[in-house]
Image (spheres, rainbow, N blue to C red):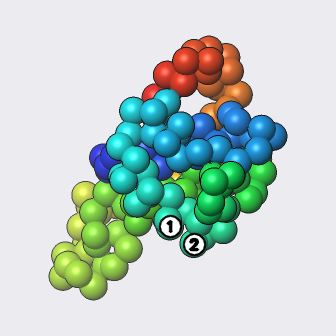
Amino acid sequence: MKLSTRGRYGLRALLDLALHQGEGLVLLKDIARRQEVSLPYLEHLIAPLIAAGLVKSTRGARGGVLLLKAPTEIKLSEVLELLEGSIAPVDCIDNPKLCHRSEFCVTRDVWVEMKIAMSQVLDSTTLQDLVERQRQKGQIETGMYYI
């Protein structure tokens, strides 16, 4: 599976919010600048995160966004499924009826193992884990952190 910019930039935006947690509302334009993402694209990415209850948005002169859940409660699997859809490397993993060979396909078995392995990593990694890794790597002051 190859992550699109949707998943990567969405995680970067959430990481940015987590790194600025406790500072109040964060302006989307500031996240866009720090993460080198266009503001319209970031607005497009934030919408499903708001709808899912991960992020809160407040409009107006003093508006901005903030995390609704603690970073320890946000699993990467939840975010990527929300932004990317299934992490299955091929469609027949989630729907075996798509291929008449599914029942006896040995390569499908490998694709299933891949999905399980990726799911285990993403299920066991939280946004807080990314915050801690970012603090170890540094570069927080400049906003230059990449996913």
Direction from residue 46 to residue 71 in the image, left or right: right
Q: Residue furthest front?
A: 61
Amino acid carrying mark 1 in the image: Pro
Compared with residue 29, is residue 66 higher up or lower down, i.e. above or below? below
Q: Find the distance from the CA under tag 2 to the CA under tag 1.
A: 5 Å
Residue at coordinates 76% horizontally, 44% vertically from top-left? 24
- Tell me whether circle 2 and circle 1 mark residues in contact (CB < 8 Å): yes
Amino acid carrying mark 2 in the image: Ala
Q: Quadrant of residue 56?
A: bottom right
Compared with residue 20, is residue 111 higher up or lower down, i.e. above or below? below
Q: Residue furthest bottom?
A: 97
Direction from residue 114 to residue 139 in the image, left or right: right
The spot of residue 103 in percent (x, y) is 29, 77
User: Is residue 30 something one can see in this rendering?
Assistant: yes
The spot of residue 114 in percent (x, y) is 40, 51
Residue at coordinates 45% horizontally, 39% vertically from top-left? 32
Q: Which of 14/63 is in front?
A: 63
Q: Dot 2 surroundings within 10 Å: few (below 14), some, or many (20 or more)?
A: few
Q: Which of 104/67 is in front?
A: 67
Residue at coordinates 59% horizontally, 45% vertically from top-left? 27
Secondary-structure class at tag 1: helix
The spot of residue 41 in percent (x, y) is 36, 52
Residue at coordinates 53% horizontally, 47% vertically from top-left? 28
Residue that mark 1 sits on: 48
Q: Which of 64/100 is in front?
A: 64
Residue that mark 2 sits on: 51
Quadrant, the C terminus: top left
Numbered label tally: 2
Q: Dot 1 surroundings within 10 Å: few (below 14), some, or many (20 or more)?
A: some
